[in-house]
């Protein structure tokens, strides 16, 4: 089974802030593209903390379901 967490997300480079994150430094989610075993997601306020790794297909379904929704 593939590990679904990365204990120290800062060990990886190339994180990008989600366009659905607020711009005021509040709720910020970052994702990492092109990770071989899924899509890592971390809290940008805790870059040295853990990241969750979602299966690519599950992440794609999630993103498809939220596209078109309005956000602040």
Image (spheres, rainbow, N blue to C red):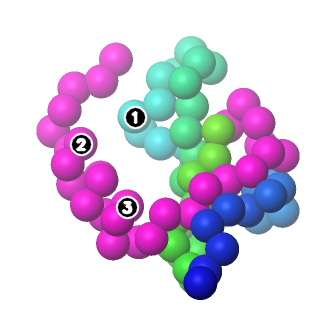
Image location (x, y in percent) of residue 71 = 30, 24
Marking on residue 59? 3
Q: Is residue 20 above or below residue 47?
A: above
Q: Secondary structure at mark 3?
A: helix
- Name the residue tied to disc 1: 20
At 21% from the left and 54% from the top, the residue drawn is 64
The Cα–Cα distance between marks 1 and 2, rounded to whole angstroms, is: 10 Å
- Name the residue tied to disc 2: 66
The Cα–Cα distance between marks 2 and 3, rounded to whole angstroms, is: 11 Å
At 62% from the left and 20% from the top, the residue drawn is 25
Horizontal side of residue 57 vs 1, given as left or right: left
- At label 1, counting other C-alpha atoms closer than 10 Å, the crowd grade (few under 14, some 14-19, many 20 or more) is some
Mark yes or no: residue 5 visible.
yes
Q: Is residue 50 above or below residue 61?
A: above
Q: Which residue is situated farthest in the front direction here?
A: 1
- The quarter in which the N terminus is drawn is bottom right
Q: Nearer the viewer, mark 3 or mark 1?
A: 3
Image location (x, y in percent) of residue 2 = 61, 80
Instruction: Choose between 3 and 70: the one closer to the eye.
Output: 3
Contact between marks 2 and 3 (CB within 8 A): the answer is no
Quarter occupied by residue 46: top right
Label 2 or label 3, whichever comes before in sequence order? 3
Magenta-drawn segment:
44-72
Contact between marks 1 and 2 (CB within 8 A): the answer is yes
Q: Secondary structure at mark 1?
A: loop
Q: Is residue 55 above or below residue 7?
A: below
């Amino acid at each position: 089974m593939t590990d679904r967490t990365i204990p120290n997300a800062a060990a990886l480079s190339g994180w990008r802030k989600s366009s659905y994150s607020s711009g005021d430094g509040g709720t910020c989610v970052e994702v990492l593209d092109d990770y071989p075993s899924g899509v890592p997601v971390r809290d940008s306020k805790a870059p040295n903390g853990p990241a969750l790794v979602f299966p690519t297909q599950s992440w794609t379904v999630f993103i498809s379901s939220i596209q078109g929704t309005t956000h602040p």
